[in-house]
Amino acid sequence: MEQKQNMEIIPSGELTGIEVTLGTIGNYEVEMDSIHNELRALVVKDQESKMKAGELKSRAAGIAKSAEAVMTPYVDIVTRVKEFVQRHRQRVSNRYEEIRSLTSQKVGDYDRKRDLEAKLEEEKKRRETREQLEKEAAEKRIKAEAEAAEKRKKLVADVRNALKRGDITKREAEKRLRAIGAVEEADKAQAAAEEEEGKKIASEVAAKTTVAVSSGPTAGLTRRKYYYATCTEQEAYIKAMFAEYTRLGAPGPLAAMIVVSDKRLTEKAGEIQDDDKMMAAYPYVKATTKRNY
């Protein structure tokens, strides 16, 4: 069975009779120049001269309409050829956009997964680093407390031996033993303080621990980051802007994000149709009326 194929008809770009048409357009241009010169020389000072201006404009409008009618068949031909060429070019462009989008999706999924794994690994390393440093600080405190206790025992033994030998009185021994106890407590307090400082340092060191995720450039891929922000609560934002203005006494960063829309002001001016009323309703706005004939 013979397979039926879709055949696309290529539009003809033949501009039959264009030379004659261009001659006609040339005549129109001469007439337009004449009207233009006559209008430039005209001084509108009374109703008669005003009517003359309207007459010249009407003649020009008629010539422009005739020129458009004469050229329309050729414009249609050019448009069909242009659309045909663009349609074929667009097929390739559309396919490229599909490929680019698919690539972004697949590579993006991979990068997000890799970034997540790196983040988890980073958190693990930070936790392990902090725990290790905190453990070392605790071990250092325990060791310091043990040394303080051992130091106390030795000093107490020395005092007792001195008392037995009769080198010191009982009252002197009491004073020395009290001082030894105070030294031990001071040593233990110092050890606890050093442990606390060690834990703080552990947190700071852990916070600086990172895991590199870059794998270097990949041929054909250029990784770009696009950052977006949208206002989710317009009314709340405006209230925050007013609060900011009250606090600073001048427009701040929030106010910098708000732009007065001239387009919407112009639309509103068209609704009001009165310059004075428009400016009264919207302060610091210049309203003007322009006439076109």
Image (tube, helix red, strand yellow):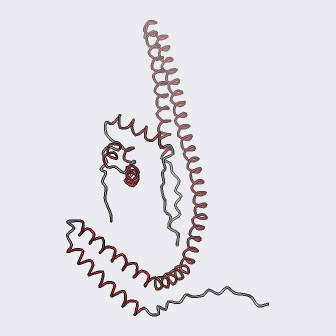
Count the marks: 0
Q: Residue at x 50, y 21 (%)?
A: 154
In this view, 278 is above or below 110:
above
Where in the figure is residue 178, as x and y percent of width and height? Answer: 46, 13
Q: Residue at x 31, y 36 (%)?
A: 249
Where in the figure is residue 165, as x and y percent of width and height? Answer: 47, 11
**Would you say 287 lies left or right of 179 here?**
left
**Would you say 117 lies left or right of 78 here?**
right
Q: Residue at x 42, y 91 (%)?
A: 18
Q: Quadrant of the C terminus?
A: bottom left
In this view, 251 is above or below 88:
above
Q: Quadrant of the N terminus?
A: bottom right
Which image quarter: residue 33?
A: bottom left
Where in the figure is residue 20, as x and y percent of width and height? Answer: 40, 93
The front one of 148 and 280 is 280
In this view, 285 is above or below 104:
above
**Would you say 109 lies left or right of 231 here?**
right
**Would you say 206 lies left or right of 33 here?**
right
Which image quarter: residue 118?
A: bottom right
The front one of 19 and 204 is 19
In this view, 192 is above or below 222:
above
Question: Residue at the right extreme?
Answer: 1
Q: Residue at x 35, y 44 (%)?
A: 282
Where in the figure is residue 179, as x and y percent of width and height? Answer: 44, 15
The front one of 214 and 289 is 289
